[in-house]
């Protein structure tokens, strides 16, 4: 049985990584932490100050460090507007930046089966690759994004077009590629197959019941929505 993790990739270029090469020993951490706290405490101007935590903190190496209070500068609305204007923007622009924002739409919530169905129906698939056991190991979408197993992510992410990705998948051993470029196939259309395959895996491997059962119930609600 194949047990491949599926990851959605929306960018085909591998991000560049910056590795912090600072020594990460516990003693260096303690020393650096004390120095940074002391520096911050010394440079903050003494106006409208709000003190923060002070006292003792247990460090990763088991030692105890004395923490001096770090002061946070607090500005009134008028002072904030003036500071922003000094940076070169107008008063109206400063007022807009400081205006309270409605963050309610940013609060995450669990999607209903109806909402998830609508989303799945919007995801049009161009090609699907399945392994010898019937597991879907890659989905290529018409919008240029893709979903694939960890083993295929590195090579597929370097391709510059869907056609190139399909050709690469066709060269993979024990992989069958279905081309849906001339059809309208969505993730919702493939959901019934996904549920059926998960149920089959439970029959073959009862120990996977707790892994799949809850997901299957939710997916069946989406199918019935």
Image (cartoon, rainbow, N blue to C red):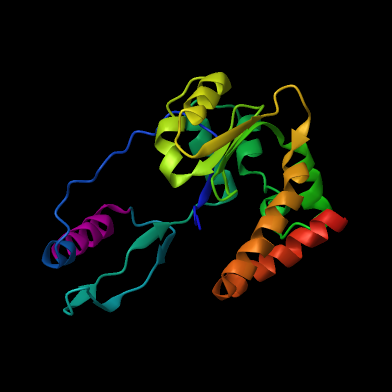
Work out whether 78 lies above or below 159.
below
Q: Position of residue 222 (x, y in %)?
A: 80, 56
Q: Which residues are magenta?
A: 31-44
Toward the right, the furthest residue is: 225
Nearer-the-camera pick, 31 or 114: 114
Q: Is residue 64 left or right of residue 169?
A: left
Q: Is residue 114 in view from this perspective?
A: yes
Residue at horizontal 55 percent and vertical 52 percent from the top: 76
Image quarter for residue 110?
bottom right
Asked if residue 210 lies left or right of residue 65, the reply is right
Question: Residue at image x 66%, y 56%?
Answer: 197
Q: Where on the picture, by quarter, is residue 198?
A: bottom right
**How far across and how far down the image is residue 168, in percent?**
47, 26
- Looking at the picture, does residue 8 appear above or below residue 224? above
The quadrant where residue 146 appears: top right
User: Observer-nearest residue: 223 or 50?
Assistant: 223
Name above or below for residue 200 compared with residue 84: below
For the residue pair 109 and 212, the one nearer the viewer reads as 212
Residue 23 pos. (x, y %): 14, 54
Q: Residue at x 64, y 69 (%)?
A: 203
Image point (14%, 62%), residue name: 25
Quadrant location, the C terminus: bottom right
Query: Can residue 108 be spotted in the picture?
Result: no
Q: Is residue 210 left or right of residue 29?
A: right
* Dominant secondary structure (helix, strand or loop) of the stretch shown in magenta: helix
User: How many numbered dots are placed on residues in this image?
Assistant: 0
Q: Nearer the viewer, residue 104 or 110?
A: 110
* Residue 33 point in image, percent of width and height: 21, 62
Q: Is-magenta flag for residue 42?
A: yes
Residue 184 lies in the magenta stretch: no
């Amino acid at each position: 049985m194949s047990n491949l993790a599926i990851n959605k990739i929306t960018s085909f270029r591998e991000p560049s990584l910056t590795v912090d090469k600072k020594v990460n020993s516990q003693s260096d951490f303690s020393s650096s932490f004390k120095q940074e706290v002391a520096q911050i405490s010394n440079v903050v101007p003494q106006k409208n100050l709000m003190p923060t935590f002070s006292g003792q903190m247990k460090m990763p190496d088991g030692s105890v460090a004395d923490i001096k209070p770090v002061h946070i500068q607090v500005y009134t609305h008028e002072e904030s507007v003036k500071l922003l204007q000094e940076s070169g923007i107008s008063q109206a622009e400063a007022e807009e930046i400081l205006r309270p924002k409605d963050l309610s739409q940013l609060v995450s919530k669990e999607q209903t089966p109806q909402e998830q169905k609508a989303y799945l129906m919007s995801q049009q698939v161009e090609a699907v690759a399945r392994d010898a056991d019937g597991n879907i190991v890659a989905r290529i979408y018409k919008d240029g994004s893709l979903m694939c197993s960890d083993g295929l992510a590195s090579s597929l992410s370097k391709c510059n077009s869907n056609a190139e990705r399909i050709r690469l998948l066709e060269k993979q051993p024990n992989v069958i590629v279905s081309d849906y470029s001339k059809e309208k196939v969505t993730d919702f259309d493939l959901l019934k197959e996904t549920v059926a395959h998960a149920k089959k895996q439970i029959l073959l491997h009862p120990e996977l019941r707790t892994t799949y059962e809850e997901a299957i119930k939710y997916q069946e609600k989406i199918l019935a929505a």
